[in-house]
């Protein structure tokens, strides 16, 4: 469903000020700039401001006295220039206030006097500084704080007038998937966020659809069954589950899907039976990972979650037994060593989103019909090609571009195809894949039968792999798995 259909009724769902009305686009893209990278972050964003709908300085933290600490010094450079440029381009400038102090949040929000004081303080600050609004990012709340947090949002919303109230909240994985293969705890359905109340009092709801790791036990089990390494920052299949669940209580026109630009490095221990344990070492920007890949002579590949990843061993013996250029072969080889020696093998894995990952999340957001995406973070360290993706208004081919114009009879696939490619041959590929329910790309909207596109995204990648498995052309771990090479093209041509 295209957002342009909603232009005539957007004012029903947004503050009714003249400035606010001018500062929206059919598909919104916002992004956080962390205060600890203010110089590089603002320098990165300034040339690309036209790409964004909103910029969020990640600067305020909640203090124990119920006031806010401005870690970023928003009244000074480089923020002053960024703010002036944003205003000139009608781009919302909305700082974030963040805390993950569970006890402090409960103390303040459960105390009527202190809660009201905080509501007044934030509203007065926004009006005094003439910000376009405020982004509330209160993480790690106790379940007992839930109703108090809802009351706080209501009070803040009432005080803000024509200013925006943005809410950044944790993702929520379907219970059956989160506890797949295990007993569901009695308190599994007790949460710290009342989504229905958040929907009432937040103009936008940013879902932090990242830091997935192993939260979705069903997807993890499916990966392990194939011998795949799986500890993603955010798999689109998981993100879709999260959004569909949370959209039951939150208006899709308010939902922004959080999109990460950072990655994780893990110590991975392989045990017998293709069992892997992942210990997080740290987060990183892509610029940190690529020199390591070069140093150890490995080539990053795309994981089943649509992210870039590779493995290595700090001793430099990666190529000897973990596979020179394939993280999947590394997992398989380490598992074989563990099996044969009745022991375990430890190696490193690095996984991170690149521009194709971001495109895939934007593609998903449009297919699901939500408001847009919110990128964490812009600090000069993310994949620089992300800006090229966002500059095209994060557009996907219109569903009006029907595949019926593509003649697949005796269609000749003249080149290899892979994730990120564009062209009419990609559209023809999707038509053929959609002709069989076993390899269908999507059931509705973008990518579904009649709505094929010319872009080879993560959904097409998954469908190609299903096609290859179905016709025994390739399987997980084989060279060319997910790549439309000679054998796959030959089979497609027969269909």
Image: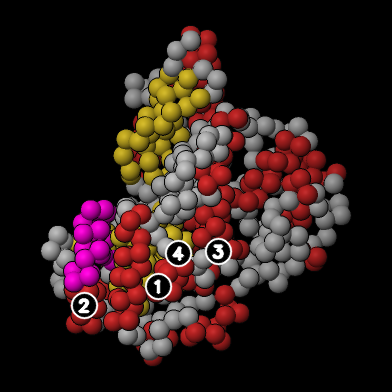
Q: Which mark is residue 195?
A: 4
Check disc 1: other Cα within 10 Å, few if <14, some if 14-19, many if 20+.
Answer: many
Q: Position of residue 368 (x, y in %)?
A: 59, 63
Q: The residue tagged with tag 4: helix, strand or loop?
A: helix
Alpha carbon distance from label 1 to label 2: 17 Å
Q: Quick one: label 1 or label 4, which is nearer the N terminus?
A: 4
Specify few, some or many for label 3: CA neighbours under 10 Å numbering under 14, 14-19, or 20 or more.
Answer: few
For mark 4, does the 10 Å Cα neighbourhood hold few (<14), some (14 to 19), or many (20 or more) residues? Answer: some
Which residue is at 63% across, 51% downward? 459
Q: Report the front residue among 323 and 410.
A: 323
Q: Residue at x 34, y 85 (%)?
A: 162
| Mark number, residue 120 | 2
Q: Nearer the viewer, residue 273 or 408?
A: 273
Above-or-below relation of 253 to 381: below
Which is nearer the N-term, disc 2 or disc 3?
2
Q: Is residue 454 visible?
A: yes
Q: Is residue 315 above or below residue 21?
A: above
Residue picked out by circle 1: 202
């Amino acid at each position: 469903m295209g957002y342009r259909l909603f232009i005539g009724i957007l004012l029903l769902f947004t503050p009714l000020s003249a400035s606010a009305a001018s500062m929206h686009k059919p598909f919104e893209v916002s992004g956080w700039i962390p205060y600890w990278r203010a110089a590089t972050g603002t320098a990165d964003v300034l040339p690309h401001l036209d790409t964004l709908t909103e910029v969020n300085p990640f600067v305020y933290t909640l203090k124990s006295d119920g006031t806010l600490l401005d870690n970023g010094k928003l009244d000074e450079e480089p923020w002053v220039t960024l703010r002036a440029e944003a205003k000139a381009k009608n781009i919302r400038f909305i700082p974030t206030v963040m805390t993950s102090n569970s006890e402090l949040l409960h103390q303040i929000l459960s105390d009527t006097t202190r809660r009201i004081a905080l509501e007044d303080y934030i509203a007065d600050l926004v009006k005094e500084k003439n910000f376009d609004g405020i982004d509330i990012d209160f993480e790690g709340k106790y379940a007992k704080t839930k109703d108090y947090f809802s009351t706080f949002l209501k009070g803040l919303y009432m005080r803000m007038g024509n200013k925006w109230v943005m809410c950044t909240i944790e993702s929520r994985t379907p219970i059956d998937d989160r506890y797949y293969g295990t007993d569901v705890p009695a308190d599994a359905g007790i949460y710290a966020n009342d989504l229905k109340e958040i929907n009432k009092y937040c103009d936008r709801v940013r879902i932090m659809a990242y830091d997935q790791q192993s939260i979705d036990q069903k997807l993890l089990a499916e990966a392990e069954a194939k011998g795949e390494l799986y500890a993603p920052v955010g798999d689109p299949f998981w993100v879709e589950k999260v959004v569909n669940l949370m959209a039951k209580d939150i208006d899709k026109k308010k939902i922004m899907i959080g999109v990460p630009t950072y990655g994780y490095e893990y110590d991975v221990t392989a045990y017998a039976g293709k069992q892997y344990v992942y210990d997080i070492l740290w987060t990183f920007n892509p610029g940190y990972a690529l020199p390591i890949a070069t140093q150890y002579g490995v080539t990053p590949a795309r994981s089943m979650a649509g992210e870039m990843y590779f493995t290595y061993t700090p001793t430099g013996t990666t190529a000897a037994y973990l596979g020179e250029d394939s993280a999947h072969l590394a997992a398989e080889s380490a598992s074989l060593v563990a099996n044969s020696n009745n022991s375990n093998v430890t190696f490193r894995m690095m996984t991170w989103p690149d521009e194709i990952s971001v495109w895939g999340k934007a593609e998903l957001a449009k297919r699901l019909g939500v408001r847009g995406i919110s990128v964490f973070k812009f600090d000069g360290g993310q994949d620089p090609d992300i800006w090229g993706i966002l500059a095209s208004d994060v557009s996907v081919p219109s569903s009006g571009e029907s595949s019926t114009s593509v003649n697949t009879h005796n269609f000749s696939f003249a080149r290899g195809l892979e994730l990120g490619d564009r062209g009419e041959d990609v559209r023809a590929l999707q038509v053929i894949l959609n002709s069989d329910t076993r390899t269908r790309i999507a059931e509705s909207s973008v990518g579904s039968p009649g709505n094929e596109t010319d872009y080879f995204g993560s959904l097409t990648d998954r469908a190609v792999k299903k096609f290859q498995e179905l016709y025994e052309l390739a399987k997980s771990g084989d060279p060319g798995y997910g790549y439309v090479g000679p054998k796959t093209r030959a089979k497609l041509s027969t269909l």
